[in-house]
Image (cartoon, helix red, strand yellow):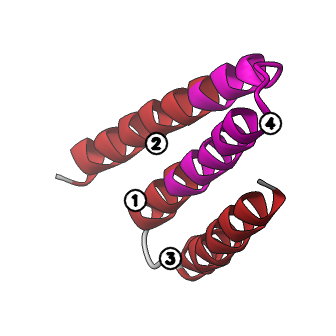
Amino acid sequence: MNVLLMVIMVVFGVAAILTVVRIVRGPSILDRAVASDVLLTEVMCVLGAEMAINGHTRSIPILLIIAAVGVFGSISVARFVARRDNTTS
């Protein structure tokens, strides 16, 4: 099972690096927000895979916190962009 965990970590590591590149390069705030959501989802998937492979549930509170941060962050960015669009029109 450790080989499977290493393969998962490498695949998600490459995906995380590409996502961080998208966060840095942008070009818009919406691109960065989507990339941040993808990065949080990748972290959640890695934690979930690690829990499944090792057969424990100790990371569930961490998964819930990460999910809440992702949802609240997306809502905040959406409200910011909507408010900004209303003032420019």
Q: Are marks 2 and 3 in contact (CB under 8 Å)?
A: no
Q: Disc 2 designates what residue?
A: 77
Between the C-alphas of marks 4 and 1, the distance is: 36 Å
Q: Earlier in the sequence, mark 4 or mark 2?
A: 4
Q: Quadrant of residue 39?
A: bottom right
Q: In the figure, 13 relative to 45: above or below?
A: below
Q: Which region is colored magenta?
A: 38-67
Which residue is the site of mark 4?
Answer: 54
Mark 2: amino acid: Val
| Residue at disc 3, secondary structure | loop
Would you call the spot at circle 4 few (<14 residues within 10 Å), some (14-19), or many (20 or more)? few
**Among numbered discs 4 and 1, the one appearing first in the sequence:** 1
The answer to whether marks 1 and 2 mark residues whose Cβ atoms lie closer than 8 Å is: yes
Measure the alpha-carbon separation of dots 1 and 2: 8 Å
Viewer-side residue, 24 vs 18: 18
Report how far apart the C-alphas of labels 4 and 2 lie in the structure.
Answer: 36 Å
- Tag on residue 26? 3
- Residue 52 appears left or right of 79: right
Q: Nearer the viewer, residue 83 or 27?
A: 27
Instruction: Give the mark nearer the N terminus: 1 vs 2.
Output: 1
Could you tell me which residue is drawn at 26 percent across and 49 percent down?
Answer: 85
* Foreground: disc 4 or disc 2: 4
| Sequence-wise first label, 2 or 3 | 3
**Callout 2 environment at 10 Å: few (<14), some (14 to 19), or many (20+)?**
some
Q: Residue at x 80, y 36 (%)?
A: 54
> Majority secondary structure of the magenta segment?
helix
Q: Nearer the viewer, mark 4 or mark 1?
A: 4
Q: Does residue 56 show up magenta in the picture?
A: yes
In three-dimensional space, the C-alpha distance between marks 1 and 3, rounded to whole angstroms, equals: 8 Å
Q: Residue at x 59, y 79 (%)?
A: 18
Label 1 sits on residue: 30
